[in-house]
Amino acid sequence: MSPAVLILAGQRAGVLDPLCEAAGVTHKADIPVRDVKMLDRVIKALVNAGFLKNIYISGYSDSHLIEVPSGGGPADSVMLGLQEIAKYPCLVTTCDHALLTPEMVLAFTEGAKTSGADICVGFAREAVIRPAYPETKRTYLRFSDVAVSGCNLFYIANAEGLKAIAFWQAVQHLRKNPLKLARKVGVGVGLKYAAGRLSLQAAFDYAAERIGITAAPVFLPFAEAAIDVDKPSDLALVESILEQRGS
């Protein structure tokens, strides 16, 4: 049986998204990417990967998917959504993952299953992204062994994974500041990160031990897995990539 899927599609209250304004829509999920709604591209990738049932959506009601409660931010929405769905394992992604492919979905879920961890997070290495798309600006987390960018893919294997989501809720405002984020895990971890002596796996191990779960990173060999649509330049890049794909 394939995992349940939760797609995050919420809007920040009171914030006008310039991409939505330019496209003349009210929700990011409705922004057309080469004449296809972003959300529809994500759904198609999931369905083509074999995820035919149990697809849920948070923060968006104009859809044939099952709607679940959303919160004030991504972590809040994941927590509320998982509590409502109550099915594990559960794959979490976002509506702006317009370059998502079945190959990415399957590579990530297989890697997560193989790890046996309670929760897994998808990453692409800078060494994969930068040569393919040197013009794109990504936020990289730099560890002693690797620099990575997140891929908006999460795998919660069981209810224990909710402990990690609760921790994410507490630190989500620090996601663009890895040093402060590391300090939240522990002062020693923060110092190691600042000194360039903390590996990615060690960071996961420290956090998992503190939370009381098991956690693992899953590396994806696809540069496009780390490219979502947050700003006009992202949209232009994504449409260029899709044009080259012929999709």
Image (spheres, rainbow, N blue to C red):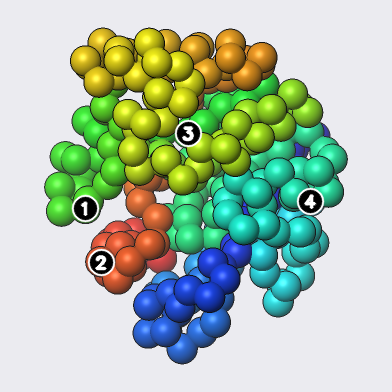
Location of residue 238 with respect to 162 vertically, above or below: below
**Three-letter residue code for mark 2:** Ser
Tell which tag, 4 or 1, sits nearer the viewer.
Answer: 1
> Which residue is pictured at 30% across the width and 71% down the height?
232
The residue singled out by tag 1 in the image is 136
The nearer-to-camera label among 4 and 2 is 2
How far apart are labels 2 and 1 at the CA level?
8 Å
Residue 235 in view of the camera: yes
Q: Residues within 10 Å of mark 3 (few under 14, many from 20)?
A: many
Which residue lies at the image location 66% right of the left edge and 65% below the top edge?
Answer: 59
In which quarter of the view is residue 72 placed? bottom right
Which residue does the numbered mark 3 point to in the structure image?
122
Q: Closer to the camera, 95 or 163?
A: 163
Which comes before the other along the chain, label 4 or label 2? 4
- Residue under label 4, please give it: 53
Question: Viewer-nearest of labels 3 and 4?
Answer: 3
Asked whether the residues under the numbered discs 2 and 1 touch, taking CB atoms below 8 Å apart as contact, a structural biologist would say yes
Mark 3 or mark 4, earlier in chain: 4
Report which residue position mark 2 lands on: 233
Q: Earlier in the sequence, mark 1 or mark 3?
A: 3
Q: What secondary structure is marked by label 1?
A: loop
Mark 2 and mark 1 lie on one chain; the one further toward the N terminus is 1
Circle 4: residue type: Lys
Q: Judge left or right: residue 172 versus residue 135.
A: right
Q: Measure the alpha-carbon separation of dots 3 and 2.
A: 23 Å
Residues tagged 4 and 1 counted as in contact (Cβ below 8 A): no
Mark-to-mark CA distance, 3 and 4 = 22 Å
Residue at 41 percent of width and 31 percent of height: 181
